[in-house]
Image: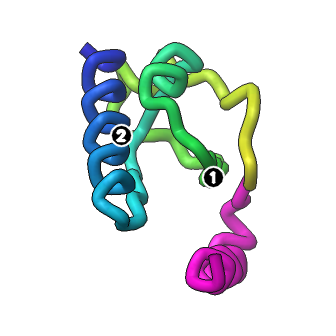
């Protein structure tokens, strides 16, 4: 179940943060419901324009309603370096 998996990933990240560390989760949450179940503090949308190889996931995918930062395919490398630098300073 996608919602349960997202909830579990969110719980795991919370435990890492409670232990005093940073948590970065990189996985597909194809719907607003799965994103809500995960409960991200900060969302980066990797908008590559490329379909996922998983047809069932692609059929469900809805672009996020809210993102903190969107990375388009042509700018991915540039923004990855900027984001990493910002997180290190935080």
Rendered image: mark on residue 31: none
Rendered image: mark on residue 53: 2
Q: Mark 1 points at which residue?
A: 44
The residue closer to the viewer here, 4 or 16, is: 16
The residue closer to the viewer here, 30 or 58, is: 30
The residues colored magenta run 70-90
Crowdedness of circle 2 by 10 Å Cα count: few (<14), some, many (20+)? few
Asked whether residue 85 is drawn in magenta, I would say: yes
SS label for mark 1: strand
SS label for mark 2: loop
User: Which is more N-terminal, label 1 or label 2?
Assistant: 1
> What residue is rendered at 62% in x and 22% in y?
62
> What residue is rendered at 40% in x and 52% in y?
26
Dot in front, 2 or 1 = 1
Asked whether residue 60 is drawn in magenta, I would say: no
> What residue is rendered at 42% in x and 59% in y?
24
Residue 12: % across, % down: 26, 42
């Amino acid at each position: 179940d996608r919602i349960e998996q997202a909830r579990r990933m969110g719980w795991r990240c919370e435990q890492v943060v409670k232990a005093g560390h940073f948590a970065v989760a990189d996985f597909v949450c194809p719907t607003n419901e799965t994103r809500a179940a995960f409960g991200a503090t900060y969302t980066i949308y990797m908008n590559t324009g490329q379909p996922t190889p998983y047809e069932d996931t692609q059929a469900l995918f809805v672009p996020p309603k809210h993102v903190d930062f969107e990375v388009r395919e042509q700018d991915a490398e540039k923004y990855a370096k900027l984001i990493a630098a910002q997180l290190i300073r935080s």
